[in-house]
Amino acid sequence: MTNATNSESQVIRLSNRRWVRVLGWVVLLAVLGLGLLGYVNPSLKMNWETLATMCGF
């Protein structure tokens, strides 16, 4: 492999990691948003135990 191929491979790996990190943040924000919505809106009947059950904990 040449140096150009190695650097292209590193860029692709970094790009993949960036998407995984962005996806993780989006999922975290969605879970926290659901929790906040359940806290603010009592008719929703969403609490932290229900949210944890939905996530598999």
Image: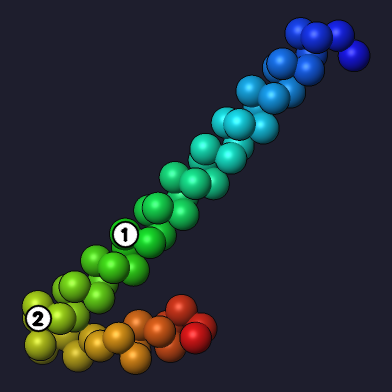
Q: Which element carries disc 1, helix, strand or loop?
A: helix
Q: What residue sits 40% from the left and 84% below the top?
A: 52
Amino acid under label 1?
Leu
Q: Judge from the rendering whether residue 44 lies leftward or rightward of residue 14; answer left or right.
A: left
Amino acid under label 2?
Asn
**In the picture, residue 39 is in which quadrant?**
bottom left
Q: Residues within 10 Å of mark 2 (few under 14, many from 20)?
A: few
- The quarter of the image holding the N terminus is top right
Q: Which element carries disc 2, helix, strand or loop?
A: loop
Question: Residue 33, percent across and down?
Answer: 24, 66
Q: Which residue in the structure is indicated by mark 1? A: 29
Q: What residue sits 34% from the left and 89% below the top?
A: 50
Give the mark, 1 or 2, whose residue is nearer the N terminus. 1
Q: Is residue 13 depicted above or below 8 in this figure?
A: below
Q: Which residue in the structure is indicated by mark 2? A: 41
Question: Residue 36, percent across and down?
Answer: 19, 73
Q: Residues within 10 Å of mark 1 (few under 14, many from 20)?
A: few
Nearer to us of marks 1 and 2 is 1
